[in-house]
Image: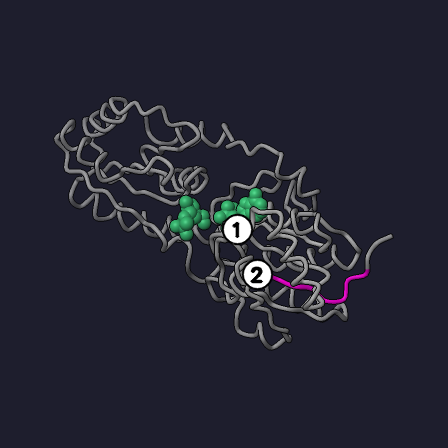
Amino acid sequence: MAKEVNTIGVLTSGGDAPGMNAAIRAVVRQSIYNGKKVKGIRRGYAGLLEEEIFEMQSYDVSDTIQRGGTILQTARCKEFKKPEIVKEAAKICGKHGIDGLVVIGGDGSFRGATALAEAGVNTIGVPGTIDLDIACTEYTIGFDTAVNTAIDAIDKIRDTSTSHERCSIVEVMGRGAGYIALWCGIANGAEDVLLPEYYDYDEQKLVDHIIEGRKKGKQHHIIINAEGIGHSTSLAKRIEAATGIETRATILGYMQRGGSPTAKDRVYASTMGAKAVDLLCEGKTNRVVGYRHGEFVDFDIIEALNMEKKIDSFLIDTCTSLNGR
Ligand code: ADP
Ligand code: F6P
């Protein structure tokens, strides 16, 4: 029998992402719309263990949909990997009357969510990460904004690169995933893209490509380097030495995690937050919301965590064929 949920908790966990506020707002308002109480939990699982829990009203999320970051703040909490700590957290939920929980975060946060579901708290995950590295979904909250931020910055770097006839290495976020890099590669018309999933560390190939481009009259050469490969500054020095072409490195860093969310991030994050509440109201637990083939869907969390995320090889081929080789 489906367990009726009366009080829904919401937290954000792991790296923040633009659009998380839209998702929080949706959880709060959809819960109230369904006659439920809603409680915000600050600082992810760490705040849950510290009982940083407070009741939220509709007006608490006013004026937040357009804001980057997360009004609930976020944290990483290593201890949450311990089963006894998760049990403690489930007890804290019970103490505060929280019988349903929405966890907005990435794969790591979903591991915590499934552990909490196992410990008796009805829990639903909502994918929030700029990295787009969650296998069960084609959309994650924040990716669209982060990519647009990076694209804008790279366009600017390209202007000055062309003026000075330089080569530029731009490092974008993505410790384990090259989605931001690949999208920028296509959207910025970069000459080369280095993805953690595919890079063969053949620097001579890069050098040859730069020299070849220069011979053809190219006035700049943009290399997008994913954070997972890193070392952009030393790579720039080596390229400059090998090509004789002035080469600069720019690490975009945390600017990609902030800023006002795009329309897509606002709308999709709102939809996913509302769907998470609907699932809880239907008595569902241990599910994660996703977006696939044009539809908002949900999966068992364990099943979702076992799926493998593959970078689209057609996108990689397209990026290569359009880069003017
Ligand atoms: P993300 O959610 O963005 O992938 P992390 O991997 O840092 O970010 O995970 C966020 C938090 O989720 C961790 O700090 C921890 O509290 C919790 N978490 C991660 N892995 C597990 C796990 N195996 N079991 C329980 N909780 C986990
Ligand atoms: O949010 C995802 C991400 O930006 C990764 O690309 C990056 O590796 C990681 O977070 C860094 O986060 P932090 O420095 O906050 O641990």
Q: Mark 2: which secondary structure?
A: helix
Label annotation for residue 49: 2
Label annotation for residue 267: none
Q: Which residue is drawn at 67% across and 69% down?
A: 38
Which is nearer the N-term, disc 2 or disc 1?
2
* Residue type, mark 1 in image: Glu
Q: Is residue 205 left or right of residue 146?
A: left
- Whether residue 10 is in magenta: the answer is yes
Label 1 belongs to which residue? 79
* Residue type, mark 2 in image: Leu
Which sits in the foreground, 71 or 152? 71
- Whether residue 211 is in magenta: the answer is no
Pointer 2: residues within 10 angstroms few (<14), some, or many (20+)? many
Magenta segment boundaries in residue numbering: 4-11
Q: Which secondary structure is most common in the magenta stretch?
A: strand
Q: Which residue is drawn at 70% across and 46% down?
A: 298
* Image coordinates for residue 74, horizontal then vertical, percent: 49, 59
In the rendered image, the vertical position of residue 45 relative to residue 54, given as above or below: above
Examine the image and state in which quarter residue 174 appears. Answer: top left
